[in-house]
Image (spheres, helix red, strand yellow):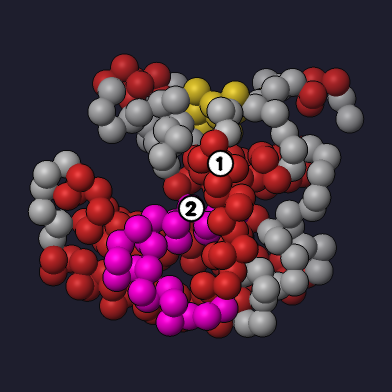
């Protein structure tokens, strides 16, 4: 491996972000030492301006390693898996890899906007700021959330991991989203109606705790 690849990567983003947490889970799973540079693109104008130099839409996370700049979580996570030593996080079997990729697409297109933004943000985050959540939006989001969880369960099949018998990027990408969904009482209750997903999440809690306590 070229010596440049031994440089410590830098991850730009807010520790609370589900996508930043997914990348951090990947880095930790691979045993990669990294620096987290906190970037608040929602409340800090200077951070937003700086992030535009790393990501054309000013979003998080962004990533730098050995002269390479990347944005978009899936691209970062795949790079981390392939660039560093450690357990393989993408199946070598064609069909299992296809399932993982399907799961990743489902997470970004449906799970994150519905479970996190329509339910968690409205039920948990807005009340923290003293603003009432939109009950109609929550109700609609919960209906859509059940569809998401049913789809995840169908792809998961026997598991025990989301894409089959071994832990993959799909698990690391999904766990922070499900973690936020469970902060809403309705979300926590709904997860329990899907025993395979509830058991999977229980197996992920130790990894999530490592991200919560890691300095980055």
Residue at point 40% right, 36% down?
59
Work out which quarter of the rendered image holds the N terminus and state it.
Answer: top right
- Which of 211 and 158 lies nearest the eye of the viewer? 211
Residue at point 49% right, 66% down?
106
The vertical placement of 122 against 18, above or below, is below
- Farthest-out residue, right: 1
Say left or right for 214 vs 95. left
Q: Is residue 72 visible?
A: no
State which quadrant residue 86 falls in.
top right
- Which of 169 and 66 lies nearest the eye of the viewer? 169
Magenta region, residue range = 172-196
- Please provide percent x and percent y for residue 57: 38, 35
The vertical placement of 114 against 155, above or below, is above
The vertical placement of 167 against 26, above or below, is below
- Secondary structure of the residue carrying tag 2 is helix
Say whether marks 2 and 1 touch (CB < 8 Å): yes
Residue 176 is tagged as 2
Residue at point 45% right, 35% down?
15
- Please provide percent x and percent y for residue 24: 58, 40
Location of mark 1 (residue): 211
State which quadrant residue 164 falls in.
bottom right
Q: CA distance from mark 2 to mark 1?
A: 10 Å
- Tell which tag, 2 or 1, sits nearer the viewer: 1
- Please provide percent x and percent y for residue 87: 80, 50
Circle 1 Cα neighbour tier, 10 Å, few/some/many (<14 / 14–19 / ≥20): many
* First in residue order: circle 2 vs circle 1: 2
Say left or right for 140 vs 56. left
């Amino acid at each position: 491996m070229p010596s440049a690849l031994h440089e410590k990567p830098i991850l730009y983003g807010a520790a609370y972000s589900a996508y930043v947490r997914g990348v951090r889970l990947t880095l930790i799973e691979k045993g990669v030492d990294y620096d987290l540079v906190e970037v608040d693109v929602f409340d800090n104008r200077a951070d937003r301006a700086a992030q535009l130099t790393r990501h054309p839409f000013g979003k998080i996370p962004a990533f730098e390693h050995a002269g390479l700049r990347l944005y978009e979580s899936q691209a970062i996570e795949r790079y981390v898996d392939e660039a560093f030593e450690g357990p393989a996080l993408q199946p070598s079997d064609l069909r299992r890899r296809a399932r993982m990729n399907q799961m990743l697409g489902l997470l970004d297109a449906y799970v994150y906007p519905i479970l996190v933004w329509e339910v968690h943000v409205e039920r948990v985050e807005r009340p923290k700021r003293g603003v009432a959540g939109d009950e109609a939006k929550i109700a609609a989001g919960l209906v859509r959330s059940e569809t998401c969880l049913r789809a995840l369960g169908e792809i998961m099949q026997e598991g025990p991991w989301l894409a089959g018998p071994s832990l993959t990027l799909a698990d690391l990408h999904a766990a922070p989203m499900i973690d936020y969904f469970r902060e809403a009482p309705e979300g926590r209750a709904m997860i329990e109606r899907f025993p395979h997903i509830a058991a999977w999440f229980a197996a992920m809690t130790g990894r999530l705790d490592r991200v919560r306590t890691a300095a980055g």
